[in-house]
Structures are given as C-alpha cells and as structure tokens.
Image (cartoon, helix red, strand yellow):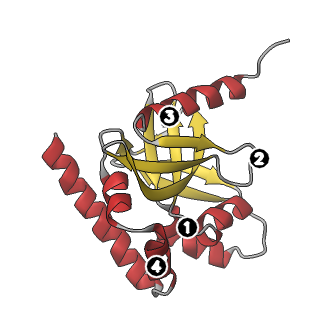
Amino acid sequence: MKRPEQHITDSLAGAIFRGAFPEWAVNGSQCDYGWDYVVEVFRNNESTGLLFSVQLKGWRHTKYSDGTFISQALEQDAADYLARHLRLPTFLFHADVSAKKLFWSSVQLDQKVLDALEQGKGKGKGLTVRIPTVHLLPSDVVVSRILLGTKPTDFVAAMSGQPSERITQVAEDLHEKGFHLDLQTN
C-alpha cells in the first residue's frame, strides 16, 4: 500500500509545529472538529494555565504572494468556527514543509476574515486568510507574549464586546509590538 502525499505533508507539518513549542504541551485532537491542537503554555517548567487552540495547514509548495503574505484557504464553516465560536485564543498556522517554516494568524482578530464571514453567512463558500510572512515562528515571539500576558477568558471577553474598528486597532497594535519585539531579538 502506498502512503498518500498529503499524509506525508501533514506529518511533516505536525513535526515542524511541535518543534516550535518544545517546552510547552502540544496536545493533538483525536477527532477533527476544526482544530488540530490545544497548546498549554509553560514558563520555567510550570503550567501557566494558558491554553490556545490551533488549526494547522501544511503545504509542500507554499506560494508567497509578493513576499509579504501567504494565502491560506479555509472552508466557510471551519473559518467561522475558528474565528467566532471557539472561546480559547485560536491561531491558524501554515507550515511550509519544503522550507521548514511556520507562519501564524490570529483569525479571531483578523477583521478581513470576520468581514468575509459576515458577508458570506449561510452561503457555504470558502474564504482565504492572508497570513503575513512576518508572522514567522519560532523567531517570532508575539504569540507567547500575547498569551503570557492575558488570560484566555479575559482576551475573549474583551474582544467579543468590541466594535470591529477596535478589534482592527488591537490587531494592528499587537502586530506592531510583535514586530518591535522581533527586531530586538535579532
């Protein structure tokens, strides 16, 4: 029996993802309901109680649109579940298995995703998430800084009551802070 290429790609993507968080607990889903992993954050070998959920997409031939972002397709139902229904902070990861690179997007804070979901409500179409190439792990420390500084329940509660303009502002602010952190570590 021959192993399908996509299964090999998925295994490689999983290895890259797990390798990005060696000191944290990475727990895979046994039933795929829209998320692949729940990650528990540890600091100094102690649990912080912080958890986040992950949808991981692996590709052998990642296309870098003008070098600034990756386009990642998601089914409408899956995107809606990740962005608007999960109560944990949720991230979409894209693994370029050929280059061994891992990129992330905070779909709950991505105003373009939220707008596309609202416009496509009930139509069953897919949508595309633009993942900035500056959101590269493991060199990018933004995810850990956000999660270590905020309780998941506080993060969700604060964002769910905000107008879309505020969510956009927070997302841009987090991106800028992450960029400056990344500059300091390099």
The answer, for residue 59, to whether it is visible in the render is yes
Find disc 1 in the rendering and name its residue. Answer: 113
Q: Could you say where residue 181 lies in the image, as x and y percent from the top left?
A: 20, 53
Mark number, residue 93: none
Between discs 2 and 4, the one toward the N terminus: 2
Find disc 2 in the rendering and name its residue. Answer: 31
Secondary element at tag 1: helix
Between discs 2 and 3, the one toward the N terminus: 3
For disc 3, the neighbor class at 10 Å (few under 14, some 14 to 19, many from 20) is some
Between discs 3 and 1, the one toward the N terminus: 3
Q: 111 or 104: which is nearer to us?
A: 104
Image side of residue 152 versus residue 45, left or right: right
Furthest-right residue in this view? 1
Between discs 2 and 1, the one toward the N terminus: 2
Image side of residue 183 versus residue 16, left or right: left
Mark number, residue 18: 3
Between discs 1 and 4, the one toward the N terminus: 1
Instruction: Choose top left, top right, bottom left or bottom right for residue 78.
Output: bottom right
Q: Could you say where residue 159 lies in the image, as x and y percent from the top left?
A: 46, 79
Furthest-top residue in this view? 1
Q: Could you say where residue 53 lies in the image, as x and y percent from the top left?
A: 56, 55
Between discs 3 and 4, the one toward the N terminus: 3
For disc 2, the neighbor class at 10 Å (few under 14, some 14 to 19, many from 20) is few
- Look at label 2 and name its amino acid: Cys
For marks 2 and 4, give the CA distance.
28 Å
Mark number, residue 159: 4
